[in-house]
């Protein structure tokens, strides 16, 4: 069926652009070769979307079952009975059977749940599994952490659903843009300009096919934005990158960078003087602007680095804080901070190690908490650290309320930051929306050139 529709479209383009049969046959061959690629990309999109809903359904079922049963094995039994048929249910059954039948493995629960984590590499699945294992081994409150995990999962689910819907709409806009651009390209060959018909020119014919192929490539590029693995989506650089950048920021040598700025400034002045000797005002202006940039390179570079780190901190901090709050259900603040090192995001690693070192020297002081990420002036971070300090000194008659406020503020921060990152990651689709118009403009220019040449070559009456 899809091939039939494609060939009908080829014939429509044959009529619209007045393609000869040789070019139409060439276009039909191209379409036959590219259809499997379009189909493959659609299948990947559909598979990733289904995997996302599998994870969402699994997390809901698992958490509600765990609250009721308070045992991993019993919760997995409920999951196996509740989930619909599919990959996730098969994995859950394998994990459940492994828990039942394995006696030689000390870490039976970890090994069983890893079967699901390998197939579905989603951080939220890992967080839920770690929480359940922790409760299984050490006990602790269940209802509040589960409600927290469900709140986080609910916001994450809404963000991804909105992102999927948004990208689908953008993809439709790209298709409509391509259709409109091709329609515009077809209009000019039907214009009654003194009985001249340039559509038979071989270059016009070839360029028409090239334009169609370029527009198809644009659609293929747009499809890539739909092929996102939503459950393991990485919105920022890898952790090692931010560990390195944070180390650079913390060990910034201002005097050394100022000396480099002065040296570069003298070089800029020399270049400007040379341009002045050449008596070119525009080059002198360029030299002056370059000199200003050189003199202030240490400020510009540090400012850009700080802005990049702040963006990552706003994304990483709420994720780390969620792990910390789960640990606080069974540990005091200092122990929870120490244990949270195991899964701390790279951008926070150095600061967390500094915090725990300061707390070893001043366990009851407020200063270590308020020095945490002090250089970045992020109100949500400072507010959270203030609440942690209050909890650490036992000033927590309303500890539950304080933790609730802490969680709500930082879930909101994570929500806003991740929405912005998701929006930025799909910004390329707007460029693809504009490209067909640009390509159509080039096609019109080519057609107009041939039209003018045909007009010039007409015999004078």
Image (cartoon, grey):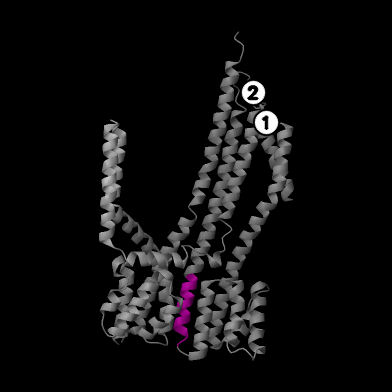
**Residue 303 numbered mark, or none:** none
Say if mark 2 contacts mark 1, CB within 8 Å. Answer: yes
Task: Look at the image and give the residue range highlighted in magenta.
Answer: 141-154
Circle 1 residue: 18
Residue at image coords 39%, 64%:
245
Crowding at label 2, few (<14), some or many (≥20) Cα neighbours within 10 Å? some
Task: Check the picture and name the quadrant holding the C terminus.
Answer: top right
Q: Is residue 360 left or right of residue 142?
A: left
Crowding at label 1, few (<14), some or many (≥20) Cα neighbours within 10 Å? many
Residue at image coords 27%, 41%:
270
Circle 2 residue: 197
Dominant SS in magenta: helix
Q: Is residue 377 visible?
A: no
Q: Secondary structure at mark 2?
A: loop
Against 40, is 243 above or below?
below
Against 319, is 145 above or below?
below
Q: Nearer the viewer, residue 308 or 76?
A: 308
Reply yes or no: does residue 148 show up in magenta. Answer: yes
């Amino acid at each position: 069926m899809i091939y039939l529709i494609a060939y009908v479209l080829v014939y429509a383009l044959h009529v619209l652009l007045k393609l000869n049969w040789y070019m139409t046959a060439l276009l039909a061959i191209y379409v036959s070769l590219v259809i499997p690629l379009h189909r493959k990309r659609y299948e990947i999109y559909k598979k990733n979307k289904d995997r996302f809903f599998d994870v969402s359904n699994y997390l809901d079922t698992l958490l509600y079952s765990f609250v009721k049963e308070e045992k991993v094995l019993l919760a997995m039994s409920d999951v196996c009975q509740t989930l619909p048929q599919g990959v996730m249910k098969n994995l859950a059954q394998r994990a459940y059977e492994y828990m039942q039948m394995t006696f030689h493995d000390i870490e039976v629960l970890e090994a069983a749940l890893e079967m699901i984590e390998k197939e579905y590499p989603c951080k939220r699945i890992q967080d839920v599994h770690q929480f359940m294992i922790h409760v299984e081994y050490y006990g602790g409150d269940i209802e509040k952490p589960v409600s927290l995990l469900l709140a986080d999962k609910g916001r994450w689910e809404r963000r991804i659903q909105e992102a999927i819907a948004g990208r689908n709409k953008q993809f439709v806009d790209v298709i409509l843009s391509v259709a409109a651009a091709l329609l515009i390209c077809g209009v000019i060959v039907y214009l009654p300009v003194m009985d001249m018909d340039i559509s038979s020119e071989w270059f016009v014919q070839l360029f028409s096919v090239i334009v169609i192929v370029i527009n198809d490539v644009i659609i293929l590029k747009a499809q890539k934005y739909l092929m996102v693995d939503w459950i393991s989506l990485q919105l920022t650089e890898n952790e090692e990158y931010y560990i390195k950048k944070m180390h650079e920021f913390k060990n910034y040598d201002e005097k050394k960078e100022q000396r480099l700025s002065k040296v570069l400034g003298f070089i800029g002045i020399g270049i400007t003087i040379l341009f002045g000797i050449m008596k070119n005002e525009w080059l002198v202006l360029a030299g002056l602007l370059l000199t200003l940039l050189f003199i202030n390179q240490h400020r510009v570079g540090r400012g850009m680095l700080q802005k990049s780190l702040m963006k990552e901190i706003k994304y990483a901090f709420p994720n780390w804080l969620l792990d910390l709050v789960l640990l606080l259900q069974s540990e005091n603040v200092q122990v929870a901070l120490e244990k949270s090192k195991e899964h701390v995001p790279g951008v926070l690693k150095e600061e967390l190690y500094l915090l725990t070192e300061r707390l070893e020297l001043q366990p009851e002081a407020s200063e270590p908490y308020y020095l945490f990420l002090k250089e970045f002036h992020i109100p949500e971070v400072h507010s959270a650290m203030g609440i942690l300090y209050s909890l650490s000194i036992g000033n927590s008659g309303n500890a539950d309320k304080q933790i609730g406020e802490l969680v709500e503020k930082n879930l909101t921060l994570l929500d806003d930051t991740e929405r912005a990152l998701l929006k930025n990651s799909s910004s390329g689709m707007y460029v693809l929306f504009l490209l067909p118009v640009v390509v159509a403009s080039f096609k019109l220019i080519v057609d107009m050139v041939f039209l003018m040449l045909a007009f010039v070559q007409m015999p004078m009456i």
